[in-house]
Image (cartoon, rainbow, N blue to C red):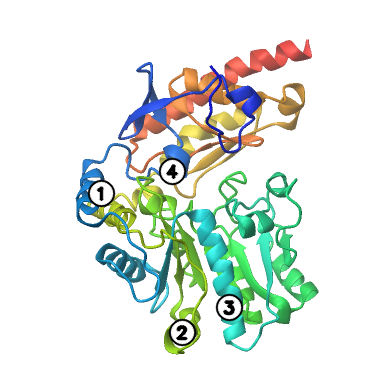
Amino acid sequence: METALWHPFSDMATVSEHEFVIDRGEDVWVYDTDGNRYLDGTAGLWYANAGHGRAAIADAVAAQMRKLAGYSIFGDFANEPARALAERLSGLAPMPDAKVFLTTGGGESIDTAVKIARRYHVAQGEPGRVHVISRAQSYHGTNGIGTGVAGIEGNRAGFGELLPSASRVRYDSVEALREEILRVGPERVAAFLFEPVIGAGGVLLPPEGYVEGVVRVCREFGVLAIADSVICGFGRLGTWFGVERWGVEPDLITFAKGVTSGYLPLGGVIAHGRVAEPFFARPGNSLRHGATYSGHPTCCAAGLANLDVLEGEGLVGRGQALEGELASALEPLAAHPLVAEVRAGLGLLAAVELTPETLAALPSAVTELQLLARRQGVLLRPLGTALAVSPPLTVQPEQLRQIGTAFADGLDELRLKVESTVD
């Protein structure tokens, strides 16, 4: 039966009659409607950091809904969960006197951060600073601005130019950023967007010195450095926001996903006190931006309960503690003839890239490998020419090895398919 549900990023002509329906979850496991169990090697969509089925989060949400399910925080309105969450995140942030603007997800957080950056420059007497620079292969959500700055070219194609004042540079070169700022003109550049580790663009780890270098270049030219920590935050890299591993102070940090471990939609932007100052200290300088559900009390209650779990169980540090285990589990795959590269070793995320020859012989190879791993009881995420791994932070070393085994067995089966196409 054809579904009425339109799936994101999906070829509905293929998916519409072949949905894979997840029914329930427990810790690192999810179950389909036939009762089959799968190791969730993707943490949902990079977000189930605390694992599935957390009663403490569900109970906090239910209690808040019985008390005050939702209310706007426009103007002088507020609610206690939103206030408490903002205070807590401000205290965790790697910059002084941080202020928190709450949103409903990562894409909305990117739009918010860029608008804050542009308005900050207006408030500082530099209204010409509107240009935004991002990186090749970067993913910054699918809202208007996020699509406009996308470094994954396929995500921009077909929509027209959504953000004319934007450009992209090599993802691995500090000098490329400097050259682009000079080409555009420093007086026109508002912000530079970077993921500490590029996620959806292929799990691309930054070269040594890169993060520190780009933040330094931004400071030199008065450009705001926006760390997109939507994927990298809340333990994925072993710290609260990921960027702490490089000892830098971004001007703005976007977050979402792991802030609630996906239990409810929530995101936000953390602003350095210096960036927030024009809005907090100068009457009449309001930011005319916000969403109906910004600061939604039930979503914030989920966030607070999730932070309690992450902190109380020491899960945040596991992203770093287990990075070596994950790399060891996947490292043997690098010798497989279908594999071009294994990218791992920085946080609890990794990717296995297939060779160009494999993809030329079997263009559907990534999808085929995903399905083969699924039959082995492991869920992986396709990323163009690679498959990604990003399990919940509760994962155990033996489960990481199970992911590696499913990959290896799937690759062996895939090799037979590839060889049959060549023959």
Residue receiving disc 1? 61
Does label 3 or label 2 sit earlier along the sequence?
3
Q: Nearer the viewer, mark 3 or mark 2?
A: 3
* Left or right, residue 423 beside residue 305: right
N-term-proximal mark, 4 vs 2: 2
Q: Position of residue 221 (x, y in %)?
A: 66, 80
Instruction: From the image, state whether disc 4 or disc 1 is nearer to you.
Output: 1
**x 74%, y 46%: residue:** 157
User: Which quarter of the image is occupied by the C terminus?
Assistant: top right
Name the residue that disc number 3 marks.
119
The residue beneath circle 2 is: 277
Mark 4 touching mark 1, by CB under 8 A?
Answer: no
Is tag 2's residue or tag 1's residue first in the polypeptide sequence?
1
Label 4 amino acid?
Answer: Gly
Instruction: Give the answer, above or below, for where 11 lies relative to 130.
Output: above
Q: CA gap, disc 3 to disc 1?
A: 35 Å
Kind of residue indicated by mark 2? Glu
Residue at disc 3, secondary structure: helix
What amino acid type is highlighted by mark number 3? Arg
Residue 324 numbered tag: 4
Q: Nearer the viewer, mark 2 or mark 1?
A: 1
